[in-house]
Image (tube, rainbow, N blue to C red):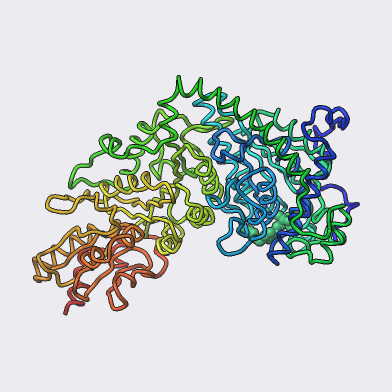
Amino acid sequence: MYNFSKPALSPGVPGLSFNFNNEKMEKNMPVTSDELKLIARTVRALSMDIVQKANSGHPGMPLGCADIASVLWTKIMNYNSEDTSWVNRDRFILSAGHGSALLYSMLHLSGYSLTLDDLKKFRQMGSLTPGHPEFRHTPGVETTTGPLGQGFANGVGMAIAENLLSGEFGDIIDHYIYAIAGDGCMMEGVTSEAASIAGHLKLGNLIYIYDSNRITIEGSTDLAFSENVGKRFESYNWHVQEIDGHNFAEIETSILEAQKVKDKPSLIIARTVIAKGSACMEGSEESHGAPLGEKEIKASKEKLGCSCETSFDVPEEVYSIFKRVKNEKKKVYDSWQMKFNSKIKNELKEKWDSFFTRPDIEKLRNHLPVFEKGSKIATRAASGKVLETLYKELPNFIGGSADLAPSTKTMVKNISESGNGKVGRILHYGVRENAMGSIQNGIAYYGGFINFSATFFVFMDYMRPAVRLAALSGLQSIYIYTHDSIFVGEDGPTHQPVEHLAVSRAIPNLNVIRPCDADETVEAWIAALARDNGPTLIVLSRQNLPVIDRTGRASAKDLVKGGYIIHDYDTHDLVILSTGSEVHLSIGAAVRLFTEKGIRTRVVSFPCWELFDKQSESYKKDILGTGNKTVVIEAGIKMGWEKYAGENAVFITVDEFGKSAPEADIADYFGFTINKIFERIVKYMA
Ligand SMILES: Cc1ncc(C[n+]2csc(CCOP(=O)(O)OP(=O)(O)O)c2C)c(N)n1
Ligand SMILES: [Mg+2]
């Protein structure tokens, strides 16, 4: 049990001396504090019932944050539950995603398409109320959360997007991003990275409330968390306040105060009690992740003054308060629409459409770079050339690197850049891959922008949680991962990805594209731009690669089929499946095999498994060939290739860590030269 007499976690944060005047505030309130009390009590009862009915879930957080949520949804946030994609709505993120019962209760009460019946199906198959909030699944849910800290960082991405959009369209975009984050979020590393960059960028539109109940699953935060969070955030350049999270006036006043701070993100440390309002569970970690039980719920409802006989009981009065709230909010919405109609529809229509309609890919094609056949260029450099076009042609195209822009080739001249206190279309994320992925997702959740991030492929490990969530949430996040194999060379095995292609391909709904040359790199970008319901990962070489002469060969446009024949004879004795920098080696070996040994080798360029899997069975059969002799050539682990090549294929792959040595020596050591491939195949065919 938590000792309530303990001092607050972050005592003495300056700038906290409010002069609360409840009476005065009451007069200005469209919702009175008695009404707030009734709402919060109802939310508590609902949340207890939701979790109890499912016999699974997290009641502690919803009870502890019911007061904060009641103020946010009635008196603070602008939204229209009937137009969930309203561009200028305030965003709300439940970073402490385990408190989903709270979010669902609030969405139900405030008029979103979420019925009491939906709440009764919490955590059940196919329901609108999954265990943790899921974007694109439940109306009103802005982000997928549950992995702690992700929501916190997503909000930073939203704040960046809001900032850029208001830079383009003026005060037609002027909303806030709110979040509730718990002790767990505050401990996660991704939060520190995201908070650090948010403070540096001076994102004044961020207002985060920290549910500081000092309880996590194992018990008191005394076990593992003793820093002064307020001071920490102050040093990140955040505006910090500390309040009693159960005092409506303090909640409201602190948020209004935070709204006034334009040059800093705001953290409101709300001292709360987990399971507040329950009969015997207040302050107990046991309330975190298990139903309270019928007996405790009955006693708690009695204590709160709710009806104890029925569950899912929402007093008519609560619905009627929310109806009034809805009408008030509708006025704000309507006046915004008027402003929008006069300003955007007349003056800025074309520009607006260029943000909010999908790019015309065929038109874009005409502007994309063309590469000289036979010349040599690293695919990362080819991607850099593509970026120049994209930045120029698409005003809503943004992105950045985690301090590796010169290496990932993601710097483009004469484009606005982020820096101290400003956002730009080129984002300098600093050395923060972890937050970069999650911030990028936040931008994608927000809408209106197409955005990419860039780093070395090996450091994808630092952002895998975000990549996974982008795939789960169907976000158009584009990842540029360069230095894609052992051919990184002298930097050695720490910098040489080997298992990363397999790891990436293992994530459902993620398109992993490893282009073999500059032309395929262009097509990889086109595929990524055209895909707006899921992320795309483009894996690029550090080293120069020949631009394959396509005369008499399939066009690189066939990349869209995932795999296609790039070299062939009338019939074939074997098939090579290959990707990226190994494709030109495969073609080189195939030519020698034919001229010196009469062996006819089909080479399949196989840049994207996921796109290939979507092709017809007959196409796949045609490409993979009729014989049973297959060789896979890829500078990564073999895992997964069996699916296309069969168990008995020859795998020229890298199933160990790489080496620190010059590129040519590495190629020779691991068998990735035309000579070595030739010899290996001759032996195999014999
Ligand atoms: C990245 C991550 N690690 C672990 C968990 C499992 N988990 C869920 S809630 C939680 C404790 C969170 O504590 P807090 O945020 O204080 O929530 P409270 O118990 O106060 O509701 C943990 C460890 C998770 N969801 N995400
Ligand atoms: Mg907690």
Q: Please say if 640 is above or below 461.
A: below
Is 121 left, or right, of 623 in this rendering?
A: right
Say left or right for 441 vs 190: left
Which residue corresponds to the image point at 88% horizontal and 53% vertical from the top-left? 4
Q: Is residue 593 left or right of residue 451?
A: left
Residue 252 percent across, percent down from the top left: 77, 35
Above or below, 405 against 328 in this view is below
**Image quadrant of residue 214?**
bottom right
For image coordinates 35% across by 51% down, the residue present is 540
Image mark count: 0
Picture residue at 53% right of the left edge, 25% below the top: 340
Residue 225 appears anywhere in the view: no
Q: Ligand 1 shows up in which quadrant of the image?
A: bottom right
| Residue 445 sits above or below residue 339 on the image | below
In the image, residue 343 sits, relative to residue 134, either above or below, namely above
Q: In terms of depth relative to the viewer, which is nearer, 228 or 92?
A: 92
Residue 503 appears in view: yes
Give percent across and percent down for residue 1. Answer: 85, 61
Which quarter of the picture shows residue 590?
bottom left
